[in-house]
Image (cartoon, rainbow, N blue to C red):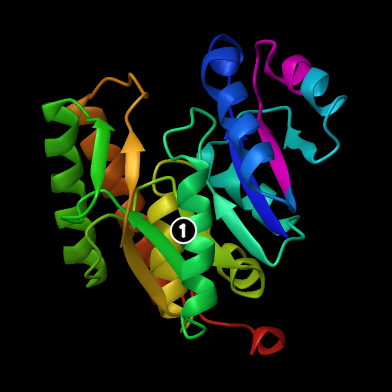
Amino acid sequence: MISIVVPFYNEEKRMHEYFDPFFERIRQQLDDFELIAVNDGSTDQTVALLRERAAKEPRLIIAGYEKNQGRGAAVRAGVLQARGELVWETDADGSYDVSQCKAFAEYLEAHPDCDVVIASRENKHSHAVVNQPPLRVLAGKVFHALFRLVTGGSFSDVMAGCKMYRRDAAKVIFAHQYDNRYLGAAETVYAAGKLGYTVHELPVTWTDVSGAHIKFITDTIRTLKGLTGIGIRTLEGKYMRSSNQS
């Protein structure tokens, strides 16, 4: 079984346009799955709409909490309750099609030495159906340059919301993921490497539907704060296995 973890925060207006067709493709193409919809403290009708859908499809499981904590916290909450042999992290807007889930699962089956597969939008074989605005592309490149400088990593894209984990690896990795918000996606990749897991980066077909605006000063401060937190936690030994995880 594949566990699909999807964070939700105020998706009421986009549920019908984006999530419904995405979920229908999952139902058509995957035989054995559970979709864990994690409500990240939504204040609109997101939960009510999810409950309507879950009443018709028992494989849709609603999780979450009342106060907004951030995407990192939502994904962690979903992963830690996942029951599938493989765990796919993705977004409610359908940026990454279920075909990517199948491709990642096939890759892990063919590469038993690999524990985690992450999408790379920067890979030369990747394809954007709808690309990000140039300013967001530039911001992403700046972030990844800073991330590689601070962590010593070599991955081209740690922020893509499309990653797949073997369940046992996921449970340990997310037990060592502390950033609740912006850098949670990147921290999981860093933590996986520090914990000794093998991470492979693969090309992806994706669509930008975020519509988010870049705020350079705010985003830069947020990035530096997040990277500082990762650095401090590294010095504190936060990314080391405990005795019962050996």
Q: Nearer the viewer, residue 24 or 189?
A: 24
Spot the residue most to the front: 28
Q: How many marks?
A: 1
**Percent position (x, y) of residue 203?**
29, 56
Question: Which quarter of the rendered picture does the N terminus lie within?
Answer: bottom right
- Residue in view at x 52 percent, y 21 percent: 18
Location of residue 232 in the rendering, given as x and y in whole percent from the top left corner: 38, 65
Residue 112 vertical placement versus 108 (above, below): below
Mark 1: give few (<14), some (14-19) or many (20+) Cα within 10 Å.
Answer: few
Q: Amino acid at mark 1?
A: Ala
Residue 176 showing in the rendered view:
no
Question: Which residue is the site of mark 1?
Answer: 103
Which of 218/26 is in front? 26
Q: Which residues are magenta?
A: 34-50
- Image position of 65 (left or right of 154): right
Give residue 35's position: percent from left, percent from top: 70, 43
The residue shown at (88%, 25%) is 55
Q: Is residue 199 magenta?
A: no
| Residue 92 shows up from this direction | yes
User: Is residue 44 located in the magenta-colored stretch of the structure?
Assistant: yes
Residue shown at 54% from the left, 50% from the top: 89
